[in-house]
Amino acid sequence: MSNSKSLPDIYLSFFMFTANMKPDDLEYREIIVKHIKKLKSFGYNGFEFPIAPPGDTPNFKKDLKDYTDLRRHLDSQGLKEVKIATNVGATLTFDPSSPDEKTREKALEYLKSRVDITEALNGEILMGPIVVAYGDFPTTDSKEMIWSDQLQELLEIRYKTAQPVLDELGEYAAEKNVKLAIEPITHWETPSFNKLSQVIEFLKGVKSRQVGVVIDSAHEILDGDGPEIFKTQVMKLAEQNRLHYVQVSPPDRGALHTSWLPWNSFLKTILPAYDGPIAIEVFNAIPPFTELMRLSRRKFWIPGEDAENAHPNAYEIADAGIKKTREEIKKVLGIS
């Protein structure tokens, strides 16, 4: 870091509250403002907004206008200094790795529209599983699931297919001052990418350094190659200027402050190589996460939206999360 004694900005993912910011919903805008003001009081500098994929009839111009209006509203409510990153995913309709050329063209148009939204939100980071459709586990013609060697051989072809799309997207993002951070995600959520090493290999075929990675502690714990190789990987990404974003999240994607996370070894590797924000990612037990991620734990009830109960609420979990994160960062940086 440029100043080893300074703390990085801490963001919170809005997955704590929603999977869809509903930017055209004027009533929900006020809820967003209320959440941000409360979370700012805990010390959060910024937030990660999930940008929901379009429906069957996409209207990218309307999407851009809606998010532009949302940013203007935040600014008008005294939140001009709040920083925003975006969380975006490829889908079956918009898949850069598809063997179908028209689908790849649609994917490029879709992802460019999400770069535009990130710029409109005054954001500089777009992150997520943007190379292969999230959660799309390939099948044979007879609808049998494809696994292991056969799956990896198929994905190698998909990766090569996607590289030119991501390269062109990177050039477009550079014009907008937006970094693209590809996220490797654990194997039980999606077939690709699962490992940081796979993304590093993929990036060898993408010239644009605007395209890099996001490292998420949860996925690294579950599917990573271990602490020693992790150090080498982080160093390589830093040298290439491709370590664009970092998330701290527990393996169960729940309460961060009580999680089994190897804080010291993770942060000792990250902090010397990275000077961007660190985002806390908690998946609350809300649709669609309950089914998608098999969340059996209780929901962190949301003040103002849910009936109060005796269990921890979303604000309490967010407050404890930033306190724990700052405490662990200070230990590594030697700040009392």
Image: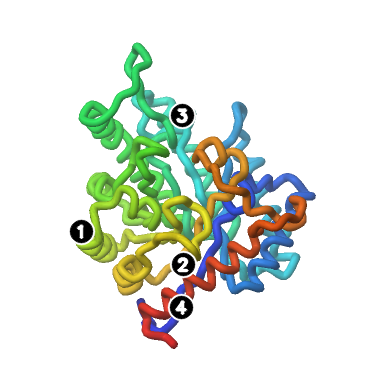
Q: Which residue is mark 1?
A: 229
Q: Which residue is label 3 attached to?
A: 92
Q: Decide which of 53, 319 is in the foreground and name it.
A: 319
Please state which of the two labelled residues, at mark 2 or mark 1, is closer to the viewer.
1
Which quadrant of the figure has residue 259?
A: bottom left
Amino acid carrying mark 1 in the image: Ile
Marks 2 and 1, the one that precedes in the sequence: 1
For label 1, the crowd category at 10 Å Cα-Cα, with few meaning under 14, some 14 to 19 and many 20 or more, is few
SS state under label 1: helix
- Badge 4 amino acid: Leu
- Toward the viewer: 123 or 245? 245
User: Is disc 3 in contact with disc 2, using a CB cutoff of under 8 Å?
Assistant: no
Mark 3 or mark 2, which has the lower sequence index? 3
Q: Name the spot of residue 313 as percent of width and height, x first.
A: 66, 58
Q: Nearer the viewer, residue 136 or 248?
A: 248
Q: Residue at x 57, y 65 (%)?
A: 46
Amino acid under disc 3? Leu
Q: Quadrant of the N terminus?
A: bottom left
User: Residue 275 in the image: x percent, y percent?
Assistant: 39, 71
Label 3 and label 1: CA atoms lie apart by: 33 Å
How far is mark 4 from mark 3, CA to CA?
39 Å
Question: Which residue in the protein does label 4 denote?
Answer: 7
